[in-house]
Amino acid sequence: MIDKLKRMAQAIQVLRLPSLGIGLISLASLVVIVLFFAAEKGDRFIIPFSVSLLWGLSTYSFIVTFRAVPDKPNAPLKCFRKLKHAITRLWYGLVSLFFLGATLAIIVVTIRMVAIWLRDHGG
């Protein structure tokens, strides 16, 4: 599973900087809205910027985390290197479960926030 995640992260490597840019622009926009706009003027954009912040930073952290997954060893390793390699791959397996849960949570939050935004500001 973590090998597939590594291939996915390497395939979307070109999205690393754009996703970070989207996340940072969204964060900056949220800060500006909260600090400088009146409550009713800025409310319309809080939900879209929050959703884009979640997805931008999640995508960036996925790419950065899983592009460094160690490959399966080609040659037999000695005892301590084998143990270190197994523990490292186990750690990435646990992190992948966290990312799966976080992605599902972000999907649910996105659906709920977009539904609220469309109800309040949509057609």
Image (tube, rainbow, N blue to C red):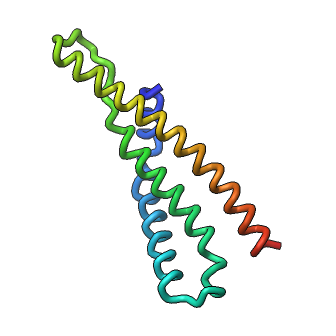
| Above or below: residue 102 compared with residue 91 | below
- Which residue is at the front of the view, 1 or 30? 30
Q: Where in the figure is residue 78, as x and y percent of width and height?
A: 16, 11
For residue 83, above or below residue 31: above
Residue lying furthest front: 39
Considering every residue shown, the one lying at the far top of the view is: 76
* Residue at figure coordinates x 17%, y 11% from the top left: 79
Residue sitting at the far right: 123
Quadrant of residue 80 within the rendered picture: top left
Q: Residue at x 43, y 52 (%)?
A: 60
Towards the viewer: 43 or 4: 43
Count of labels in the image: 0
Percent of width and height locating residue 121:
75, 75
Residue visible at 70% across and 57% down in the picture = 112
* In the image, residue 63 above or below residue 56: above
| 42 on left or right of 95 | right
In which quadrant is the C terminus drawn? bottom right
Res 115 → quadrant: bottom right
Q: Nearer the viewer, residue 99 or 2?
A: 99
Q: Give the residue displayed 44% in from the left and 40% down from the top.
A: 9
Is 83 on the left-hand or right-hand side of 54?
left
Estimate the x, y position of residue 44 in percent, counting from the top left.
Answer: 66, 78
Using the image as rendered, state which of residue 79 and residue 21 is in the foreground.
79
Q: Establish if 63 lies above or below 86.
A: below
Side (left or right) of 11 relative to 73 = right
